[in-house]
Image (spheres, helix red, strand yellow):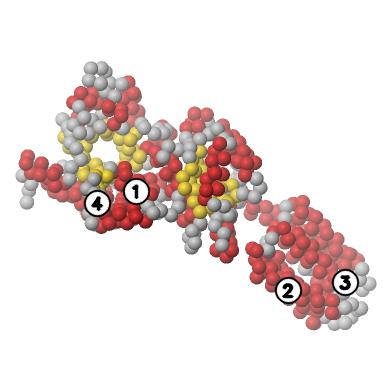
Amino acid sequence: MSRTAGGLYLFGGILGTTVTILMPNETSGNRLIVGSVGASALIIGAALLILGRRVDPRTHPVLILSATVLLTVGIVNATSSIAALGFASLYVAIICDAAFVFSWAWGAVNTVFAVTMCMVSLAVRPDIPWWTGLVPAGVSLAVACCVGVLARIASDADIDALTGLVNKRGFDRSLDLEIARAGRIGTRPAIAVLNLDHFKLFNDSRGYADGDAELQRIADIWRKLLGPNRILARYGGDEFALLMPNMSEHGVILLADRMRDAIEVGCSAGVTSWQQGESASFMVSRAMVGLYRAKLAGRNRSVLETDHDPQPTAAILDAIRSDAVDIALQPIVDLQASGKVVGYEALVRWCDASSQTVSPAEIVHAAEENGLISHLGAFVLARACEQAMRLAKATPGEKLTLNVNASGLELIEAGFIAGVDEVLSRTGWPADQLVVEVTETFLDIDTPVAIANLAALRRRGIRIAIDDFGTGYSSLSRLMTLPTDILKLDASFVASIAPDSPPPPLLEVIAKLSAALGLYIIAEGVEYTNQATALSTLGYRFAQGYLYGRPQSVEQLLADLAANHPIPT
């Protein structure tokens, strides 16, 4: 606002000063007053451009009023009738500014005042008929209406039609402006990205009309809670974003908790604050990571994503570089072919400096916490493909599959696909024999980037498996729309198979569901023969568990193969 007004003041001051020098002395007037008006406009315009965002927006009505008064004084004191008519055309600039930045009501007040001053300033001059003011006044009025309408159309492009909140485009624009301001005056904006828990289930069970009504209700509650000076946006779907120009991370967490308490629907939030030199998109991505971790931690909570202790980061990096991180391979078998091994799942292993084994979940969590999950994922994929190639050479004629887990944080990386392509090209492992596993939690925290990456994997022939199926939020509509090929049934279902009783009916339902969706299932956690028999009877084809083999190193697997079948040279 200040720079727009400054530009118009400067433009008017330059024209006014130039005309003051050139206009003849045809009538009584005061060239000194006109020159002073031009000089004042120049000084005000330069000051506004220099001060920029430091000018309080509440001064803008005063600036518009002052410009109208200065211009009127210049017209009345012009020493030439032609110069006076020329000056009157500058009312258009004043009215355009008012129509662009003010509400309809304030814009109308300023427009009426400027048009009135235009008519009066020309009418009081004895050398100009009063009706000559109709042209500049009419043109100014018409232009003001056009600018007002166009400004509001442009403004509506930043508004979500359903809730009336700012949309993603408007939020990103506001965040860019706030970061630019923070770089100059030293503030530290903070944001929160909020996602309604299980809202897809709400839409599936009650319909999208009720879902839209619920989104409108939540937006109204939060709008009243936050007040007029906070930027709340509907970032997309059931996701909202909050921008606080200068609030501590702790303050934003408390505010997010108040927002959660104000609604009946569960809500998770990722919170972060701006770090010197980072872009708006990177800041939003960091908040998304916090949201992802809030979902993984059980939902309905806020997680702060900020700087981390560098010691775990160094430990993980050292472990990767020194090969302390490795993988073990667990066989996947075909139940309908007498337990024949058809593939392997790669599981990450790491022994720390105290020689105590750290669980795969702990390794992944540490990597995610320290921003190293992409490095770890690329390392594991490459090592798994290299070792799978060794097994493939030892079992000629067998088309083994390789299952590798991918963190949800990897999938939201724009360079994830390029990394997979590079590993497959370097190791020679066929894309159609690779299965990428994602956890079921991903079903309700997916992002457009992650979905695009999964679709890109499938276009390359890589299959997608939903891991731990049945333990999280299982939406049938999401299974039909997500790029999915395989369901990995959680071990808790297999553990429910008792030795002396029929298998739980739910297992039969899941088998029929997978057949209807065109997906096949891998049953995890098979430890006993009776479990394998029950699964085979129900139509399950693939299984994985200690009954068929524990996770082993490739050296152990090759040794077992050599003991049963000589390895070709």
**Who comes first in sequence, dot 2 or dot 1?**
2
Tell me which label, 3 or 2, sits earlier in the chain: 2
Q: Amino acid at mark 3?
A: Val
Q: Residue at x 26, y 54 (%)?
A: 319
Three-letter code, disc 2:
Ile
The image's mark for residue 76 is: 3
Q: Earlier in the sequence, mark 2 or mark 4?
A: 2
Say if mark 3 contacts mark 1, CB within 8 Å: no
Task: Give the SS element for disc 1.
Answer: helix
Q: Alpha carbon of mark 1 to alpha carbon of mark 4: how far?
A: 15 Å
Q: Which residue is mark 4?
A: 353
Residue 366 is marked as: 1
Nearer the observer, 153 or 227:
227
From the viewer's perspective, is 349 left or right of 288? left
Q: In the displayed image of the protein, which residue is found farthest to the top? A: 501
Classify mark 2: helix, strand or loop. helix
